[in-house]
């Protein structure tokens, strides 16, 4: 009977977590298909209102500045492109923490194991998920950037002003780069310099290729020269960097697969043994020495994963 209430709480939390995760996945897929900025422009009467509401939905204030005291977390949320919904994220984190804490309470022997697991999932899980989404979004934006710069170059060669060239990218390309260039075009239209607007886009994107684009614009503003030629050179440089990254990724593919196998194999084997012979681990799992041993194994596995991650990832 003492396990009935925790089991009911775990099932309820699991259902809530599943619903929240499915809703989050739906939001991410919607971002990949549509241009959020164009949606906001259709909902509001003026461009200024749409721009302000779009900023607020990204975790920024009406002037485009960060709003949270934890700037690194605010920056991570902005780079993820998700709608700023702290109450919903807190509910998802709480549901996941209840499920994980309940499992630890049942299988690892009481509150001593459940409380650390609950706290770790409550605090760490949302950060890990948002960081993963932000990194995926940055990679997709970087892949779209050369095509976007080509559109800007062709528009400038046709005699259009810079603001028009940037807004053309916002109309022609999907998210994430469509919305980012659209916000930049709106800021330029309302009086911000191109250099500052592009720098803000680089801060929102969090990708080194976008930083290179911002540096090119700053260089042109300070030294002069043909912006079109500079952007063409910038586009070629970005394409070469991306090609080199793909070559490095192909060369390190064996290491990544090895890391995945070495990480997943112990858990798969342990799960299979537990399903075939529950008493194999069940009879000793509550022993302190066994729990300390498992904790030590997890620590060593984390160190090994960190070493392998350093071996297969290169900064370029």
Image (cartoon, rainbow, N blue to C red):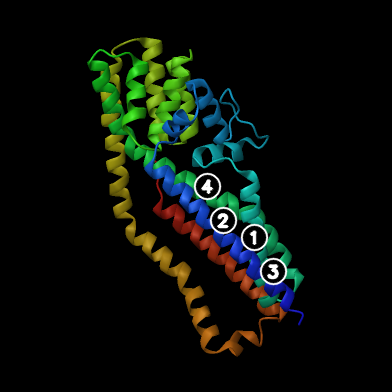
* Location of residue 31 with respect to 67 vertically, above or below: below
Q: Identify the residue position indicated by label 4 in the image.
A: 131
Residue 9, numbered circle: 3
Q: Would residue 260 appear left or right of 73 to someone viewing this image?
A: left
**Res 217 → quadrant:** top left
**Res 164 → quadrant:** top left
Residue 155: x, y in percent? 26, 20
Q: Identify the residue position indicated by label 1 in the image.
A: 95
* Location of residue 97 with respect to 42 vertically, above or below: below
Residue 111: x, y in percent? 76, 70
Residue 167 appears in the picture as rendered: yes
Element at label 3: helix
> Marks 1 and 3, Cα distance to the nearest angstrom?
9 Å
> Could you classify mark 4 by the number of other residues whose Cα lies within 10 Å: few (under 14), some (14-19), or many (20 or more)?
some
Residue 143, numbered circle: none
**Res 274 → quadrant:** bottom right
First of labels 1, 3 by sequence position = 3
First of labels 2, 4 by sequence position = 2
> Could you classify mark 1 by the number of other residues whose Cα lies within 10 Å: few (under 14), some (14-19), or many (20 or more)?
many
- Verify CB contact (< 8 Å) between mark 1 and mark 2: yes
> Could you classify mark 2 by the number of other residues whose Cα lies within 10 Å: few (under 14), some (14-19), or many (20 or more)?
some
* Location of residue 188 with respect to 316 vertically, above or below: above
Q: Identify the residue position indicated by label 2 in the image.
A: 20
> Could you classify mark 3 by the number of other residues whose Cα lies within 10 Å: few (under 14), some (14-19), or many (20 or more)?
some
């Amino acid at each position: 009977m003492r396990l009935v209430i925790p089991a009911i709480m775990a099932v309820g939390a699991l259902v809530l977590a599943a619903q929240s995760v499915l809703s989050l996945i739906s939001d991410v897929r919607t971002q990949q298909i549509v241009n959020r900025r164009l949606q906001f422009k259709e909902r509001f009467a003026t461009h200024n209102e749409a721009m302000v509401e779009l900023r607020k939905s990204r975790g920024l204030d009406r002037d485009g500045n960060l709003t949270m005291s934890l700037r690194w977390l605010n920056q991570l949320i902005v780079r993820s492109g998700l709608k700023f919904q702290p109450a919903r994220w807190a509910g998802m984190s709480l549901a996941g923490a209840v499920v994980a804490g309940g499992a630890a309470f049942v299988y690892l022997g009481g509150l001593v194991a459940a409380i650390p697991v609950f706290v770790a999932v409550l605090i760490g899980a949302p950060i890990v998920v948002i960081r993963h989404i932000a990194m995926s979004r940055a990679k997709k934006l970087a892949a779209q950037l050369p095509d976007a710069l080509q559109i800007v170059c062709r528009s400038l060669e046709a005699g259009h002003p810079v603001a028009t060239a940037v807004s053309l990218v916002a109309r022609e390309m999907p998210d994430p780069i469509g919305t980012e260039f659209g916000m930049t075009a709106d800021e330029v239209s309302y009086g911000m310099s191109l250099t500052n607007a592009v720098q803000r886009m680089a801060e929102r994107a969090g990708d080194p290729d976008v930083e290179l684009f911002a540096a090119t614009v700053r260089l042109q503003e300070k030294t002069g020269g043909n912006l079109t030629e500079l952007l063409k050179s910038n586009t070629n440089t970005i394409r070469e960097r991306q090609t080199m990254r793909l070559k490095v990724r192909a060369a390190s593919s064996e290491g990544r697969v090895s890391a995945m196998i070495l990480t997943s194999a112990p858990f798969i084997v342990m799960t299979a043994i537990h399903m075939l012979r529950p008493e194999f681990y069940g009879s000793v799992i509550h022993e302190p020495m066994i729990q300390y041993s498992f904790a030590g194994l997890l620590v060593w596995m984390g160190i090994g994963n960190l070493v392998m991650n350093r071996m297969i990832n290169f900064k370029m």
